[in-house]
Image (cartoon, helix red, strand yellow):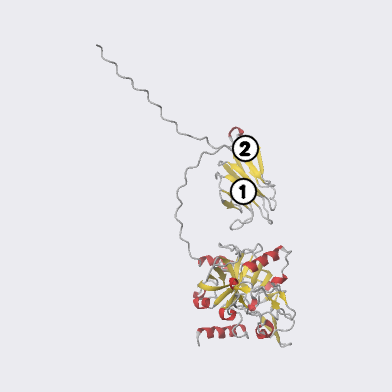
Amino acid sequence: VDRQQKLYMLALVVLGAAAPGRGPVAGPTPGPRVVYGSDDRRDHYALNDNDAADVMAKSLLENAIMAHVIRSDLGSPDSDGVYRVLDDYPDFGRLGPARGMCDDQRFLRDPRLSYCSATWVGEDRVITAGHCVEDQFDCDNAAYVFKYYVTGYDKNGDPTFPEITTDDVYLCSSVTTDFADGGTDIALIKLDRAVVGGRTPPIYQKSQVPTTFGQKLLMIGFPDGLPAKVEDGGAVSDTGSSNGYEFFTASTDAFGGNSGSGVFDEQGTMIGVLVRGVTDYVSDDERGCTVVNELPNSAGGEGITYVDRITQLEPSQPSPPPPPPSPPLPPLAPCSVSVDSGPCSLTKNGTHSCVTSPGFPNDYPNDKGCTITCLPAANTVEAFDVEEETSCQYDYLEVNGVKYCGTSGPPNGEPAGAVQWVSDYSVTAKGWKICWELENGSSPSAPPSSMPSPPPSASPMLPPPSASP
């Protein structure tokens, strides 16, 4: 029996009666998933364009979420470059018949095309679960597909889909993971080419930022091989402090096939990768059919790998050569501290002057920014409390091209020149205050230009006196 046949038989053992040649595999160690509380899964067409959270989820789905499909299941494009695998999907491969589902269950007419889930994070890079692509053999059989989501239903009650073209399909070129050797369940995929189409990848955490208990989560993936489902009803049930923050657990409604799904925080930053959970489906013995396994939210046990673990797999970049020395700067023209735009405040009291965030010492408002010019080098940061985020992408004070947030402001005496303040649409804090002392209450100015003085000219030499005759 060759390796492909062994994988197929393993899929049948793990997941039950999957359609031949189709259906997701949860992997050797990770198990299938489940629904907690009510089933919160929604299709692309059901997202509300007037709801900010749904708009964010739809953008992530359209731009970054990819289905891992076995290449032989996907088939080849037609002469117009269109993949037609979903046009006449066989009934036996749809969820209802394939799983023997009871008639009152959801998504009965959905196809089960995909194998795992994945998230595109830029250029030719994709993040997924390690058990989905353990080695190059698995990679050689994997295609990654955008636009596998439901746009509505036809008159027969079958789901409809956007057209999937060659620009939406990419092949696995190589995989980096140490999962098969006992490492973390996460993998970095290199595609056969960079993604095209003007898509925007999500931001993902590249350093350790632990979740908090009860933190709300958004997960987008392909449960049981179905078209993409958006699930935003889950929350963190264990932050993972006991395992060194390698993974956390949550009450996300997930199934086999969700393995590799991107898990995002409420701002749309990718924080994890779904890898394991508990039993998907259970038998309704009274009706003789299968139903989704429903558990209370408090029982949340879906395992999610912290996505910052991917940095251990990313190739190190060689250090660039040092830049050439900069030419000397021309003398600075005199200038005075000023708030050139926005609601920041500038106060002067004799020789003591300060500039503050809007409203200080009260919390600064949302969606406000300002620019301060000519901040002197001899300054002191007297207060600094700004919304904290690893890369300071929400609220920040930018000094010399460096963004500061949290409670760590710029160093005292940082030569500043122009300073920019930005706050986003949510979460505020006390803000900041920077002060300086001036002699005689004067404004700081640039040092005067120091041109070298010419050497003193020598006196002309007088001829020696002539000898007396």
Residue 99 in the image: state x and y as whole percent: 67, 84
**Residue linked to disc 1:** 420
Q: Which amino acid does label 1 sit on?
A: Gln
344, 385: nearer the viewer: 344
The part of the image, by quadrant, that contains residue 15 is: bottom right
Estimate how packed mark 2 is, as few (under 14), some (14 to 19) or many (20 or more) residues with alpha carbons within 10 Å. Answer: some
Residue 258 in the image: state x and y as whole percent: 62, 75
- Residue drawn at the location 64% of the way across and 75% of the way down: 222
Query: From this viewpoint, is residue 139 visible?
Result: yes
Estimate how packed mark 1 is, as few (under 14), some (14 to 19) or many (20 or more) residues with alpha carbons within 10 Å. Answer: some
User: Given this view, does label 2 or label 1 mark the residue nearer the observer?
Assistant: 1
Residue 280 in the image: state x and y as whole percent: 65, 79
92, 11: nearer the viewer: 92
**Residue linked to disc 2:** 352
Classify the position of the C terminus by image quarter.
top left
- Residue drawn at the location 75% of the way across and 79% of the way down: 155
Query: From this viewpoint, is residue 236 visible?
Result: no
Q: Quick check: 370 above or below 99?
A: above
User: Mark 2 or 1 closer to N-term?
Assistant: 2
Residue 383 in the image: state x and y as whole percent: 62, 47
The part of the image, by quadrant, that contains residue 270 is: bottom right
The part of the image, by quadrant, that contains residue 93 is: bottom right
Q: Which amino acid does label 2 sit on?
A: His
57, 272: nearer the viewer: 57
